[in-house]
Amino acid sequence: MKRLLTALFALVALTSVLAGCGQKGPLYLPDDGKTAQERDRDVFL
């Protein structure tokens, strides 16, 4: 029973860590002076 709980805990921990990966979106606070379209255009240039 102890082995089953340990394996289940490890699976939950691994799933939690992997769920945090793949964060999408900008990794910075955008400037307030620019509109969303201007920011998007700057990214693709």
Image: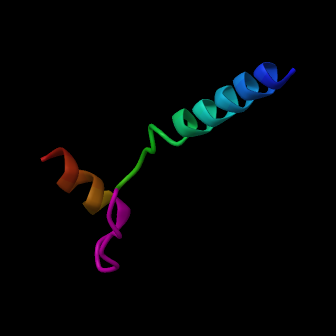
Residue at the front extreme of this rendering: 2
Q: Name the residue located 30 percent from the left edge and 75 percent from the top edge.
A: 31
Q: Is residue 41 left or right of residue 1?
A: left
Instruction: Look at the picture and state if 23 lies above or below 15.
Output: below
Start and end of the magenta stretch?
A: 27-36
Scheme of image coloration? rainbow
Instruction: Look at the picture and state if 33 lies above or below 8.
Output: below
State yes or no: residue 37 in magenta.
no
Q: Nearer the viewer, residue 1 or 16?
A: 1
Residue at the bottom extreme of this rendering: 33
Instruction: Look at the picture and state if 16 lies above or below 7.
Output: below
Residue at the left extreme of this rendering: 45
Q: Mainly helix, strand or loop, the magenta region?
A: loop
Numbered-mark total? 0
Measured from the top left, where is residue 22 in percent x and y?
Answer: 44, 37
Q: Is residue 21 left or right of residue 16?
A: left
Q: Name the residue located 29 percent from the left edge and 72 percent from the top edge.
A: 34
Q: Name the residue located 87 percent from the left edge and 20 percent from the top edge.
A: 1
Q: Is residue 17 left or right of residue 30?
A: right
Q: Where is residue 2, by image quadrant?
A: top right
Q: Name the residue located 52 percent from the left edge and 42 percent from the top edge.
A: 20
Q: Nearer the viewer, residue 2 or 27?
A: 2
Measured from the top left, where is residue 39 in percent x and y?
Answer: 27, 60
Measured from the top left, where is residue 18 in percent x and y?
Answer: 53, 33
